[in-house]
Amino acid sequence: MRRAFAVAALLLAASLPVRASVLRLNVNDMIHPISDEFIGRAFEQAQSEHDDAVIIVLSTPGGLLDSTRSIVEKIMTSRVPVIVYVAPAGSRAASAGFFILEAADVAAMAPGTNTGAAHPVLLGEKVDEIMKMKLENDAAAFMRTIAAKRGRNVTIAESAVRESKSFTEQEALQQKLIDVIAPNEQSLLRAIDGRTFKRYDGTNVTLHVANTRINTIEMSLKQRLLSSLMDPNIAFLLLVLGGLALFAEFNHPGAVVPGVVGVIAIVLALFALNFLPTRFASLALLLVAFALFALEAKFATHGVLGIGGIVCMVIGALFLVDGPIPQMRVNVITATAVSIPIGVIAIFLTTLVLRARRGKVATGSEGMVGEIGIARTPLGPDGKVFVHGELWNAIASNQIAEGARVRVASVNGLHLVVEPAE
């Protein structure tokens, strides 16, 4: 009997409709390898939990082309339908974000948003017209492939690449770049409920997501930390602060703490710079800056070398990360505000060290050299002298009378070598 009840319960549970669910993730930063990793993890979770769709809530000024291509590839091959939603109001999906928006199964925007401006940006180098044309044609072909597969306006989508055109949400809808405008996620799901669309693999999918449950996936602690490090301003700050800490450790050997902090900061900075379009010549400029700070403290050039070091550090910072958008480069204000204090501190630390090394030794036997004492016995050449509150055996090269003032010339074991103070 119990077994019959159990079987009936299982059959009843199997006959009940499974409540649909949608997985949401927020991408409100630059597009870089960490964004790519986060989106990939979300797709894997959505597939394993059999979610009906994935919503990428997107707000980005753009980012790296390699990461963008990887994200688009993940969207194309995802087994779970992908909805890209530019939101909230005031957000944008510019440059790399436009490629991601157009690649989605469902492209949506909130009121008061914009997209486009997807022209490829050359990374600082001045290239000839042929190379520039190659890069532009490659990006345009990439966009044509995406738009054609999704049945969107290929000509208008390509103009965002070739002519850097931007579109409001109404313009994007009218010109068939997006599928729907919705003020929030629930209204978006209701608007697309029951729609059938063709996926990249040729299959037709009908969405049934009205009033469905929305689960949110957040970045892991590691991804949040790495995403913060991907900010070029933070990477530069860690790099120069780590350099200053090592500079202090080399000038004061044995302090340990500055050395440990410096190594950790530099390793974190180099980890971030490894993923960013970094100019390694700029790292050489930063090393030259610290060298000039040390020379300024040693030779006292009235600020000439110090100013040169600050200029080297500012220039090195500005060219350190050659990103495709301004947000992926070190800000001028950051470069200046960091370089000047770092230069002043480095010169000050070096000055203290040089003064300490040039100063007279005040402890141990070497500290006796130059001290003035009184001969307590005649020195001819041996005798006794009273120096620094102590009675010493002394040797003099000339005859010195008792009570005469003497100066310590050197220390020879337990004997002082003295000479007349006059």
Image: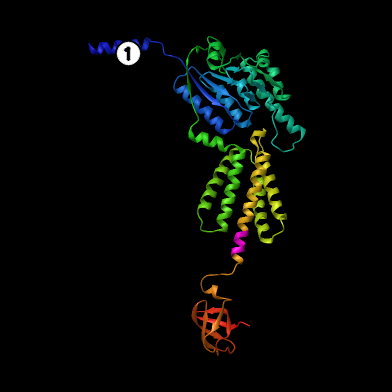
Chain part drawn in magenta: 351-356
Q: Where 398 sits versus 341, above or below?
A: below
Coordinates of residue 208 in the picture (x, y in percent): 50, 11
Q: How many marks?
A: 1
Crowdedness of circle 1 by 10 Å Cα count: few (<14), some, many (20+)? few
* Image quadrant in which the C terminus is located: bottom right
> Which residue is at the front of the view, 366 or 181?
366
- Identify the amino acid type marked 1: Leu
Q: Is residue 237 visible?
A: yes
Coordinates of residue 115 in the picture (x, y in percent): 66, 22
* Image quadrant in which the N terminus is located: top left
Residue wearing tag 1: 10
> Which residue is at the front of the view, 402 or 321?
402
Q: Quadrant of residue 400?
A: bottom right
Q: Quadrant of residue 119?
A: top right
The furthest residue to the front = 403
Decide if residue 14 is on the left or right side of residue 66: left
Q: Where 353 sits versus 408, above or below?
A: above
The residue depicted at 59 percent of the width and 40 percent of the height is: 234
* Label 1: element kind: helix
> Which residue is at the front of the view, 130 or 121?
121
The residue depicted at 64 percent of the width and 55 percent of the height is: 347
Coordinates of residue 314 in the picture (x, y in percent): 68, 45
